Image: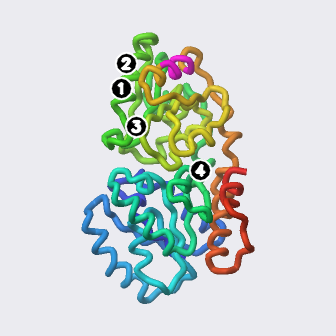
């Protein structure tokens, strides 16, 4: 199988698209032979155009059973051939027209031309009204993301032991992340809990993220749009309390986990929920609640999609992908 993606870790961007990399590794462990074709559109937008001749040349002396593309622009390149079946995963924001509204129309045009479409959340599937789409979120690495004593994690990172620490992880400069809401909320939190501090984690190797999640007392997420935010699943794997706005599949992931909370998009409500969590910091049982998102299980679901695309799978019920992903 060939994976075509515009998100994949590089030496310059070690945390860029780690969820695609981890999915590739899980498929390999499951016995699937996988090559990766990376289109680095973040480095230069022209790389998408240059991607077409590169892609054709890449296929010239290689043979595959099918191609799996991640994100719509990668899918456009991957569909520039009809020799192989094409599976396309929609990860979220582009389907919702963020940050470029025209990408939503590309999604609508391209999806019917694919043999199978995967959506990382039910919200994304509904946005394209694809009744036959599969709902399969990206899995979480339960080997790397596991609970550690908070004191040990703080000592290893050089963080103070006497502070209440709130973690925000991601690219804070992107408008859809709404980082200004985090800053407003934290100002309110600090008015009630002066020893509370925000830990901003960005542009760091992905392997240090579990340490930060174990060192902090809560994770906060305020995004305007998400598909299936990995940071929430990774926090759950570390038993870190989560305070998030209702975005993507966050509600399905955290459910009624004690210590986690959904907040409105109002900084005052986010702050209030954080204060409740921080007054008596404790860990959750989130890890036990996301076992269905472990990599080996997600890989088996993907293989079922591939078999179906190749005409080898059994007839599936409408929306059965959602049942398999979350059941």
Tell me the CA gap for discs 2 and 1.
6 Å
Query: Which of the two discs, 4 and 1, sits closer to the camera?
Result: 1
Determine the secondary structure under disc 2: helix
Tell me the CA gap for discs 4 and 2.
33 Å
Percent position of residue 325, x then y: 67, 55
Tell me the CA gap for discs 2 and 3.
18 Å
Tell me the CA gap for discs 4 and 1.
29 Å
Q: Earlier in the sequence, mark 3 or mark 1?
A: 1
Q: Are marks 2 and 1 in contact (CB under 8 Å)?
A: yes
Q: Are marks 4 and 1 in contact (CB under 8 Å)?
A: no
Q: Which residue is mark 1?
A: 183
Q: Are marks 3 and 1 in contact (CB under 8 Å)?
A: no
Determine the secondary structure under disc 4: loop
Q: Residues within 10 Å of mark 4 (few under 14, many from 20)?
A: some
Magenta: main secondary structure: helix
Q: Which residue is mark 4?
A: 141
Q: Which residue is mark 3?
A: 201
Q: Earlier in the sequence, mark 2 or mark 3?
A: 2
Q: Residues within 10 Å of mark 3 (few under 14, many from 20)?
A: some
Q: Which residue is mark 2?
A: 187
């Amino acid at each position: 199988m060939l994976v075509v993606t515009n998100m994949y870790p590089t030496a310059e961007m070690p945390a860029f698209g780690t969820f695609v990399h981890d999915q590739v590794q899980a498929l390999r462990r499951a016995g699937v032979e996988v090559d990766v074709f990376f289109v680095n559109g973040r480095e230069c937008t022209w790389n998408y155009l240059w991607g077409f001749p590169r892609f054709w040349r890449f296929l010239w002396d290689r043979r595959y059973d099918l191609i799996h593309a991640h994100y719509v622009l990668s899918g456009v390149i991957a569909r520039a051939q009809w020799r192989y079946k094409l599976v396309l995963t929609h990860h979220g924001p582009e389907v919702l027209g963020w940050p470029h509204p025209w990408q939503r129309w590309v999604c609508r045009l391209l999806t019917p031309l694919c043999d199978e479409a995967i959506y990382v959340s039910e919200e994304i599937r509904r946005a394209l009204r694809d009744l036959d789409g599969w709902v399969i979120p990206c899995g979480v690495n339960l080997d790397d993301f596991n609970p550690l004593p908070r004191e040990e994690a703080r000592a290893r990172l050089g963080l103070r032991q006497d502070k209440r620490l709130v973690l925000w992880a991601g690219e804070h400069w992107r408008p859809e992340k709404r980082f200004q809401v985090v800053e407003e909320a934290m100002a309110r939190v600090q008015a009630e809990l002066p020893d509370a501090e925000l830990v901003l984690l960005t542009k760091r190797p992905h392997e240090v993220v579990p340490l930060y999640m174990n060192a902090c007392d809560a994770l906060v997420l305020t995004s305007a749009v998400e598909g299936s935010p990995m940071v929430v699943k990774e926090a759950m794997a570390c038993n870190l309390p989560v305070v998030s706005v209702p975005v993507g599949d966050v509600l399905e992931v955290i459910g009624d986990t004690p210590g986690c909370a959904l907040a409105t998009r109002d900084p005052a409500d986010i702050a209030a929920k954080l204060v409740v969590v921080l007054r008596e910091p404790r860990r959750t049982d989130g890890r036990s609640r996301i076992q269905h998102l472990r990599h080996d299980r997600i890989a088996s679901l993907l293989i079922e999609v591939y078999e179906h695309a190749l005409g080898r799978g059994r007839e599936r019920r409408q929306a059965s992908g959602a049942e398999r992903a979350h059941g």
